[in-house]
Image (cartoon, helix red, strand yellow):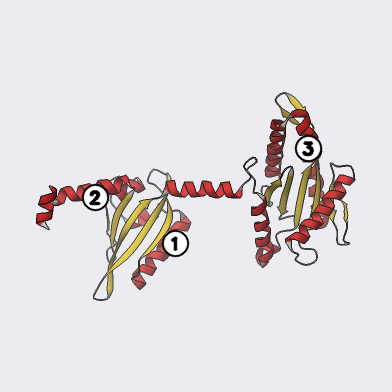
Amino acid sequence: MREDHAASGLSDEARVRLYDQAFGVAGIGAWECELETERLTWTEGVYGIFGYPVGNPLRRANIVDLYIEESRRHMEIARAEVIRSGRPITLDTEIRTWRGEKRWMRLSINAVREHGRPVRIFGSKQDVTFDRQALECLRQQAETDPLTGLANRSVFQAAYREVVSDSLNYDFASALVLIDLDRFKELNDTFGHLAGDACLCEVAQRLRRAFHNAGLIGRLGGDEFAIILRAPTSPARIARVLQHTAVMLSRPLFWNGLRIEVSASIGAALISRPHRRRITELFAEADVALYDAKAAGRNAAHLFSDEGRSRAA
């Protein structure tokens, strides 16, 4: 081994320093914890990930507080499992640095046993914030409508299936609401597609403000929006919500010095009436109510009733 070091021209100290520098560039550090005393040892890379001053004392209780609550719980469970089983575990955790910056960290945990008893744990910590942000960006692109930022059709339908398949959530979802803008093609033809896009974005903002606790708001495509309504649950109160929504959406939009008239037709179907239904059946009922609202002169809301037909809200 000494001959190898001499041939490379590096002393042991220089080699360690080189490894630390390389790991630091990669956002990786090594750590160790004595189980009996909970004494921590970190390399420079870990100090960098936590933004922790090198001169500060390393107390495990203080470091654990830097983990976001859910990640702290997962980390403690993984730590206990490694100590119990001796099998290594790797998990992603979210931390808040010593200066308050949020980061994602990949934590690996392994155990050293002596005479069959765990005496210390060790592993690596790597800053994976950039990777997590890139994945989150890709997820948002796949799940959201690029124009309005609302959930897209596939995500909206998946969310409905989750609601109706979960007995705990099912009671809190009261209605499927479909919203279609009135004469949207005429608006595009008259003012242009930029005005149409501005109108869609404004409608999305109004729906967000009015239904921020609704459950889920989505754009299904074109000028059609949808809401999974959590509350209220009674048909009479749902009807009043639909009326208020129609009034709210009928306020004019001011864009580039122009006053643009906006209105919407609304159709809704009760999710819990009388039994759970397939999503295709529920959308069909809401579509009937939406068609009836448009046939009644637009700028109106209809609710599909227990009698198998819609009525004005």
Give me the residue at 16% from left, 47% from top: 14
> Which residue, as the protein is rendered here, is positioned at the far bottom?
116
Q: In terms of depth relative to the viewer, which is nearer, 36 or 226?
A: 226
Which structural element holds mark 2? helix
Which structural element holds mark 3? helix
- Find disc 1 in the rendering and name its residue: 74
Give me the residue at 34% from left, 62% from top: 109
Q: Where is residue 269 drawn, in percent x and y? A: 79, 56
Quarter of the image holding residue 169? bottom right
Q: Is residue 122 left or right of residue 308?
A: left
* Three-letter code for the amino acid on which mark 3 is drawn: Phe
- Find disc 2 in the rendering and name its residue: 19
- Find disc 3 in the rendering and name its residue: 184
Quarter of the image holding residue 34? bottom left
Q: Is residue 155 above or below residue 206?
A: below
Give me the residue at 45% from left, 57% from top: 71
Quarter of the image holding residue 85? bottom left
Which structural element holds mark 1? helix
Sort mark 3 into few (<14), some (14-19) or many (20+) by Cα contacts within 10 Å.
some
Q: Is residue 60 left or right of residue 268?
A: left
Q: Is residue 26 left or right of residue 211?
A: left
Q: Is residue 248 left or right of residue 160?
A: right
Find the distance from the CA under tag 3 to the CA under tag 2: 63 Å
Q: Where is residue 215 drawn, in percent x and y? A: 67, 53
* Three-letter code for the amino acid on which mark 2 is drawn: Tyr
Find the distance from the CA under tag 1 to the CA under tag 2: 30 Å
Q: Where is residue 280 drawn, in percent x and y? A: 75, 60
Find the distance from the CA under tag 3 to the CA under tag 1: 49 Å
